[in-house]
Amino acid sequence: MSLERRLGQNPGLYNEYKAFMQEYEDMGHMVSIAAEDLHKVKYFIPHSCVVKPDSTSTKVRVVFDASAKTTSGVSLNDIQIVGPTIQRELFDQLIEFKTHDKVLMADIAKMYRLILITDQDTWLQCILWRYSPEKSLKAYRLMTVTYGEASSSFLACRELHEVAEKYREINPNIANIIQQSFYVDNLMIGASTTTELMSMKQHIEQALLRHGFPLRKWAANDMCALAGIPEQDLKPLIQVGDQEVIKTLGVAWNPNKDVFQFISVNATSKALKALTKRQMVSKILRLYDPLGLVQPVIVTAKILMQELWTNNISWDDEVPDYVFNAWMKYEALLAELKHIEVPRMTIPSQTIVLDLHGFSDASEKAYGYAIYLHSIDLRGNESTKLLCAKARVTQLKKVTLPRLELLAAVLLAELAVKRFSGGFELDKIHEPTLGNIYQERNHEDTRLHET
């Protein structure tokens, strides 16, 4: 009833909410419970919605709060095993996405809702719902993997891995790609040529469709790879400034220019006379940069946030004037982020030499590192591009500058060992057939090698 009152104040949102639930019921993803079966219900999940205005598919999504406590003081999530992380980390996915000439991405449509839950467990995920206050309340069972439950992410990823295992006898390589190239429902693959990429796409589609996982929202940096895909299944572009980009996994990618761009937070109103810690932190948390491509910008905001902790500012207290003024100047400059373009591809084609170079440094306020890839192709052309970076604010306890520099070096070394100790296993790195390339260019002190 509380939900109905809130939705009743926004008729447009209410209609979209009802449309979402109607689709849920029409697709058989939730079924009504007969009166004589109500005694079988073990748990009712409260539900509400999240609104994503920039979403290209579902702008209003109903979410379920399986962390809500029952009269026993226990929630559904309390009794669930979360499950291990079996998908690759987002950082690794994006790093690999930066290493191919031709890249392609897609989403699995309604991934969670394509996976059925065993019947006896559906009595643990029931909801109350009616399409208008004039109608009687009805109880429903959710028949599929459900948003908001502790085990849902694992169950979805585990099902995808099972699809790959069933396809392994047909094509082991495609099975490995399915297991390694999805971040939940987001597929990101790459290859050296368009032909290879299209072949990979065809096999992945075939494997997934055999088990009821249709792919949609296709995007690529080569339109040839999208041949034959209906327009409604292409990923829509969103406008950032005067550029059209695709937003995926928190990163804005311009497939036409093949560059990463950045979506800044909405600027604070110039008429604003004060700012609370809660408001400021909320804006800072929207600055998402998983590869650290604009770390100098992000860490500046974190330094300002640290000032609030130093002064023991409460969440709803106004920030000091000097922090407020600094933030207003900082936020005004965030709009300039939309002009920054970072090339997606860090390894050019026909590479014969590939070196990884890491740099770390520290100041009294922050420390961090940056990693670059230096490459040489068959024609002797050299290229150096930023691969990733990371920065942290210094701890509140006073630390000497040499120790901070050591912390930065340790941060860099840990990443190098964890992520890059095995090198890049890429078919685009050719045998050094031009082994005398350095001698021709008088690079006497450098050895030709592969990483």
Image (cartoon, rainbow, N blue to C red):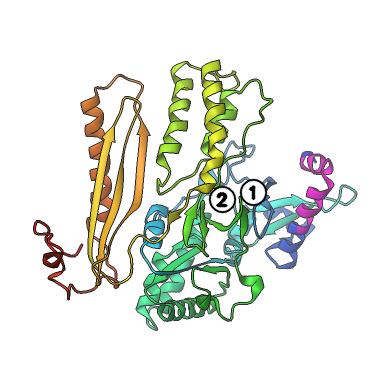
Q: Mark 1 points at which residue?
A: 64
Is residue 191 depicted above or below 77 in this figure? below
In this view, the residue in front, 192 or 55, is 192
Residue annotated with mark 2: 149
Q: Which of 14 and 244 is in front in this view?
A: 244
Residue 320 in view (yes/no): no
User: What's the magenta region?
Assistant: 3-19
Q: Is residue 144 above or below residue 359?
A: below
159 up-or-down from 335: above or below: below
Seen at 59% across and 77% down, the residue is 229
* Circle 1: element type: strand
* Residue at x 58% of width, y 81% of height: 228
Distance in Å between CA atoms under marks 1 and 2 = 8 Å
Q: In which quarter of the image is the N terminus?
A: top right
Tell me which amino acid carries mark 2: Glu
Which circle's residue, 1 or 2, is located before the other in the chain?
Answer: 1
